[in-house]
Image (cartoon, helix red, strand yellow):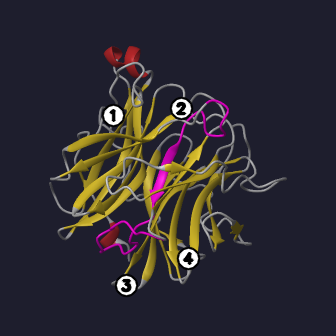
Amino acid sequence: MFESYETPYKLKTPVLEPSGIPGEFDALLVDAPRLFRHHGKIYMMYIGYDGRGYQTALAVTEDMIHWKPLGVILPKGNPGEWDQVGRAGTCIIADTDLYGQRELKKIDGKYWLFFHSYPGEGYEVGAAAHGIAWTDDESLMHWHIGSQPIFTKSQGNQWDSGGLYGNWVFPIDGHYCMFYNGKENLNWPWHEQVGLAFSDDMLHWKRYEHNPVLPVSPNGWDCCFSCGQHVLYDSKKKRWVMFYCGYDGVHAQEGVAVSSDMVHWEKKREPIIPNGPVGSLDETHAHKPGIIWHEGILYHYYCSVRPARDEEKKIYGNEYRCITAARSIPW
C-alpha cells in the first residue's frame, strides 16, 4: 500500500551544510527543504538560521547531489515589522502531481510563496504566524512581502492556540487548500498536529471544523509531533499522499499517510525514513520532507541532525543540522 512512497536508500552525506560563518544567514544550520522545477531546472527552497532568526534561500542542482546556493530570497523584515525576526519559507505554489514536474504555477501572473515568522529572537521562540509573498521575477530572487500575517493561531483552548509552524498550500477546484501545523500550548510540553483550512483568495482562511486531520498517534513513533507535511496527489492510484515527520520525544523521523478526501488519513505504521545509528548523519533526527520525482526516481530530501562533535560545538552548538537525501533506488 505504501511501497511506492518509500525511499530506503540514504545518501548519508550532506547536500547542503550550514556555513559556520558568524553573521551569515545560515551560520548555525540549514533546514526544511522544498523542491520544485522552474524553466527546466530543479531548485530547492530552504531556510537558514543565524542564532537569532530564520531567512529563506534558494539553491539549484544539475545532478540531485551537488547544490549551488543562489542566495537569500526572504530576508528578515525591517525593525518594527511583524516578521522582523525572520521569514521561514514553507512552500511556493506548484504542480501537485507526485509523478509530475513540480513546476511552479503562476496565479494572476505571479508566483506565490508562503512563510512563517516567530515573534521572538532565538530558535522557534513564541507563537508563529503565516505570511505571503509574491513575485513576477523569473529569477525568483526578488519578492514582495505582505505587510500583515494571513493566518494566526486560534484563540482560546484549541489544538492550535499555542502557535503555528509551517504550511503547505495549493489550488484545487477554484479554491485553495492549506495544510498547516499547530500546537496547543506555547510552552513545552505540547503536541504538533496537522490541520486544514480553505480560502478563495489566499488571504482569508477558514479552518476545517474537524481539525486536526493528521493527529498524533498515542504510544506511536509520532506520539508527540505529527507535522511538517508535504501533500501531493498520486495520479496513478488516484489518492492524496502526505509525507510528514513524527516525533516521540527523542527522535524525529519521516512518515507517510494516504487519503481519498484530504480529511481522513491512513498512516503507515512505521517510519519510511528512520533516524540512523550512532555516528550517522541523522543519528538524532531525520525530518521535514522535500519530495520530487525525477527521471523515474522518487527523491526525499530532509533535515538530518546528529550531536555536534567536539570541534563543531564552538561553531554550531550542541547539534549539527544539514540537508541530505534518500531515494527509491540505490545511489
Q: Quadrant of residue 321?
A: top left
> What secondary structure characterizes most of the magenta part?
loop
Q: Nearer the viewer, mark 4 or mark 2?
A: 2
Say left or right for 187 vs 309. right
Check disc 4 and report its element: helix, strand or loop.
Answer: loop
Of the numbered discs in the image, which one, if any, rests on residue 53? 2
Q: Amino acid at mark 1?
A: Val
Of the numbered discs in the image, which one, if any, rests on residue 182? none
Q: Quadrant location of the N terminus?
A: bottom left
* Residue receiving disc 3: 237
Q: CA distance from mark 4 to mark 2?
A: 33 Å
**Residue bounds of the magenta highlight:** 79-107
Q: CA distance from mark 3 to mark 4?
A: 14 Å
Vertical order, 202 against 16 (above or below): below
Judge whether residue 86 is colored magenta.
yes
* Residue receiving disc 1: 278
* Sequence order check, earlier mark of 3 and 4: 3
Vertical order, 100 against 132 (above or below): below
- Residue at horizontal 31 percent and vertical 72 percent from the top: 4
**Is the residue under label 3 in contact with that under label 2 (CB below 8 Å)?**
no
* Sequence order check, earlier mark of 4 and 2: 2
Q: Amino acid at mark 2?
A: Gly
Q: Quadrant location of the C terminus?
A: bottom left
- Residue at horizontal 19 percent and vertical 48 percent from the top: 65
Q: Nearer the viewer, mark 1 or mark 2?
A: 2
**Is the residue under label 1 in contact with that under label 4 (CB below 8 Å)?**
no
* Residue receiving disc 4: 262
